[in-house]
Image (tube, rainbow, N blue to C red):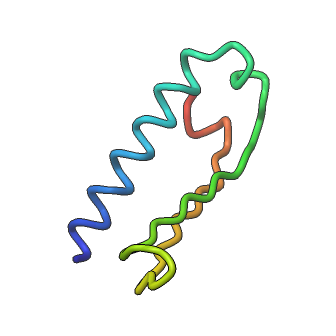
Amino acid sequence: ILSQDQTLHRIIFNNIATIHQKSPTLKKIQEFSLSLVFSVGRPPLQVATYAVNFNISMNFFI
């Protein structure tokens, strides 16, 4: 499970980095937060919720 989580984080982070580098608007933002929530199961009986939080600083992309 840990390796799957790390892969998921890497995919999401790489996509964010790509979008950030290509977007003139996002380049002006020094720091921002992103929260993604994944739910397992069908409503209303969702079994588990998995939250991914990113605090992204402009320094990461330089």
- 38 on left or right of 35: left
Q: Quadrant location of the N terminus?
A: bottom left
Callout count: 0
Q: In x, y percent, where is residue 16?
A: 51, 37
Residue 38, placed above or below residue 55? below
Q: In x, y percent, where is residue 18?
A: 46, 26
Residue 34, placed above or below residue 39? above
- 37 on left or right of 24: left
Residue drawn at x 34%, y 45% is 11
Residue drawn at x 48%, y 75% is 43
Q: In x, y percent, where is residue 19?
A: 53, 26
Residue 35, placed above or below residue 44? above
Location of residue 60 (image quadrant): top right
Location of residue 30 (image quadrant): top right
Residue drawn at x 45%, y 71% is 39
Residue 56, placed above or below residue 54? above
Q: Nearer the viewer, residue 8 or 41?
A: 41
Residue drawn at x 40%, y 38% is 14
Q: In x, y percent, where is residue 15?
A: 43, 35
- 57 on left or right of 1: right
Q: Quadrant location of the C terminus?
A: top right
